[in-house]
Amino acid sequence: MDFQLSDDQRALRSGIRDILAGRFGRDRMRTALDTGTAVDRGLWRELGEAGFFALRLPETEGGAGLGLPEAVLLFEEAGRALLPGPLITTHLAAGAVKGAAEGTAVVAVLEPGSPVEHLGDADALLVLAPQGAGASEPAPGPERAYTVTGGELRDLVGEAAEPVRSLDPFTPLWRISAPAGAPHERLSGELLPGRTARWRDEGALLAAAEQLGSAARTTELAVQHAGGREQFGAPIGSFQAVKHLCADMLVRAELARCAVYAAAVTADPVEIAGAKLLADEAAVRNARDCLQVHGGMGFTWEADVHLHLKRAWLRSGRWIGAAAAEERLASDLRRGAGTPH
């Protein structure tokens, strides 16, 4: 069985890398960071026009009709480039929330007990039901779509609007609301019930792809720095300790790549959980090792290494966290061994 990328997939990956290099190069990334611009609406529309969000929609609905393997390649490049914003949620909601596919709407995700990223930029909010049992309060129902209108949260499913309860993005999902005074136009659309598990798994896989891209990029940064930085009259890359760090980074990144690509082909929930664990470890540990290779300068604001580490830490707890992924893998092992649940 051949798991090599096809020519079309290589062209897709190369194309999105060129697009991001041209439209979100390092200068634009640093400007967005320095100015506190969480979501650049112009860039968001450019991504929509390039088909980033509509990639998996059928051609009859204006998409490219591609699948998870191709989406993984796109999100891997997004992770390399530190592309900000709720990319995964907007991609998942492309067929359900008006404007998401075209990049004219920003869709954020609400999960139980988790902080909401980019809540202030959201036009619509995708609310996922809790992961399994153990929630302290009942969830409001199946996944829903909401819009932000004048600081109020409006329900797109059915006639009734959800009451506004709290403006604190760190409260559980059923108490979440929009930030005060967020003037967004109400959208139309509907998200059908019964998709939580699939969306959560797909979101976890795409987050793993972003982690993979970040792990690969920090490996490159470490190797580049080790080859150019000299100490005692020799490149630090010639020192055995630095060689071992870089070699370990490469092994972690390539192991995660195998797992992520395989999970994209099978879409198996257990393989997705394993891929997320490996990709999270690769992204976090590679960023930390890259900081080690860079020394003190890696912690400075001007360097990009610490940005990869912060983003990796944040992604590791989203969609499927380590505890949930490990429990899924353990349950699969118990089933395979014939052990009762």
Image: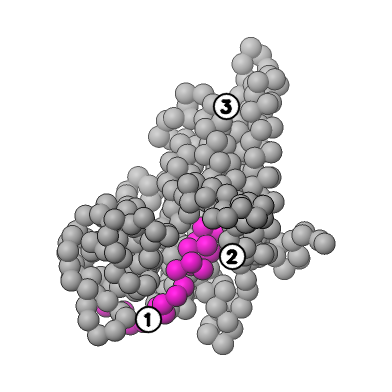
Disc 3 packing (10 Å; few <14; some 14–19; many ≥20): many
Q: Which residue is most to the top?
A: 232
* Residue drawn at the location 48% of the way across and 66% of the way down: 197
For the residue pair 262 and 64, the one nearer the viewer reads as 262
Residue 208 in view here: no
Left or right, residue 171 beside residue 132: left
Residue assigned mark 3: 293
Confirm or deny contact between disc 3 and disc 1 (CB under 8 A): no
Q: Is residue 332 above or below residue 277?
A: below
For the residue pair 168 and 218, the one nearer the viewer reads as 168
Q: Quadrant of residue 149?
A: bottom left
* Residue drawn at the location 28% of the way across and 73% of the way down: 147
User: Which color scheme does this rendered protein use?
Assistant: one colour
Disc 2 packing (10 Å; few <14; some 14–19; many ≥20): many
Q: Is residue 286 above or below residue 196?
A: above
Q: Quadrant of residue 132?
A: bottom left
Magenta span: 185-205
Question: Disc number at residue 190?
Answer: 1
Query: Callout 3, which amino acid?
Result: Val
Q: Earlier in the sequence, mark 3 or mark 2?
A: 2
